[in-house]
């Protein structure tokens, strides 16, 4: 309540933290400072970087828009999208049965659930570019290695979220089928998966966005796509072509994200 004579009441001051909390804050700040030191943070480098960045832009602008370069980069971008779409679609398909094994109380016991979840955690812990290196060694250079890397990365991403979506699905239809004596696999196919399907589609669209972003850099390690053109541009100091590649990647990724967002909005609207 305000007082006409004294004016509005002042907001309450921060309470003094307990000793343990204060020690935690100090340790947190010390950890941040230690990480900054290990990362080589330097104010001198920060202050000296704008002129160097401006020099790069002056040498890269205008981007190389010659017809032969655009045609070559365009085909590489098409290959990048092929890698992303093929890997994401196959990854989503493989993720569904794996997620059914990872979902608690669905078709498998706790031991299998935990083993599959640990495997999915391991897959997610390894970066997609590391998977690309593994598959380049296994199947050789080219887009097939990139597609396999996207497939495995999508499996780790969708497998976990599909399992969570099935665990969070409406239990009513599943309980009704269970009361009739239906088998676990029938309950999952006829009740749990249909209930979680909108969430599956939304997660799959996020996986496609992630796959497109990842596939643009897999060429750096020889796994196909437009990333190799970016590497060659910087290696040869052909900055106008490198800038063209960067702009092309940005336009394609933003377009995919926009279309994916529209699709998710429509799905949510239909669900309501």
Image: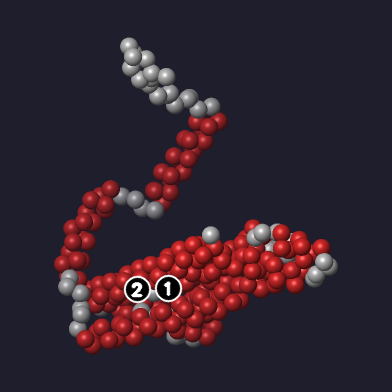
Q: Is residue 170 left or right of residue 58?
A: right
The residue nearer to you, when weighing 228 against 200, is 200
Q: Residue drawn at (36%, 53%), measured in percent from left and top?
A: 40
Sequence-wise first label, 2 or 1 = 1
Residue bearing the label numbered 2: 252
Q: Residues within 10 Å of mark 1 (few under 14, many from 20)?
A: many
Q: Contact (CB < 8 A) between labels 2 and 1?
A: yes
Image quarter of the N terminus: top left
Residue bearing the label numbered 1: 212
Q: Residue drawn at (20%, 78%), measured in percent from left and top?
A: 64
Give the distance between the C-alpha atoms of the residues marked 2 and 1, in whole angstroms.
9 Å
Q: Residue drawn at (55%, 79%), measured in percent from left and top?
A: 90
Residue 187 marker: none
Residue 207 higher or lower than 32, as above or below: below
- The spot of residue 66 in percent (x, y) is 19, 83
Q: Is residue 238 left or right of residue 76?
A: left
- The spot of residue 191 in percent (x, y) is 69, 67
Q: Residues within 10 Å of mark 2 (few under 14, many from 20)?
A: some
The residue nearer to you, when weighing 255 against 154, is 255
């Amino acid at each position: 309540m305000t007082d006409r004579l004294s004016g509005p009441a002042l907001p309450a001051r921060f309470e003094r933290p307990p000793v343990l909390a204060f020690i935690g804050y100090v340790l947190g700040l010390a950890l941040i400072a230690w990480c900054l030191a290990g990362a080589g943070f330097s104010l001198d480098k920060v202050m000296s970087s704008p002129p160097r960045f401006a020099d790069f832009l002056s040498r890269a602008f205008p981007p190389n828009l010659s017809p032969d370069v655009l045609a070559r980069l365009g085909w590489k971008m098409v290959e990048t999208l092929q890698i992303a779409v093929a890997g994401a679609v196959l990854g989503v398909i493989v993720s569904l049965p794996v997620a059914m094994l990872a979902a608690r109380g669905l078709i498998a016991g706790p031991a299998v659930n935990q083993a599959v979840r640990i495997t999915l955690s391991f897959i997610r812990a390894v970066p997609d570019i590391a998977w690309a290196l593994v598959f380049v060694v296994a199947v050789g250079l080219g887009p097939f290695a990139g597609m396999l890397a996207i497939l495995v990365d999508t499996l780790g991403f969708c497998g976990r979220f599909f399992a969570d979506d099935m665990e969070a699905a409406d239990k009513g239809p599943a309980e009704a089928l269970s009361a009739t004596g239906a088998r676990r696999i029938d309950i999952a196919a006829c009740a749990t998966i249909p209930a979680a399907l909108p969430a599956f589609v939304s997660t799959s669209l996020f996986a496609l966005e992630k796959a497109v972003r990842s596939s643009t850099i897999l060429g750096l390690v020889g796994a196909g796509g437009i990333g190799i053109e970016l590497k060659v541009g910087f290696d040869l100091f052909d900055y106008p072509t490198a800038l063209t590649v960067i702009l092309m990647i940005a336009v394609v990724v933003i377009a995919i994200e926009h279309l994916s967002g529209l699709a998710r909005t429509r799905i949510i609207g239909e669900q309501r």
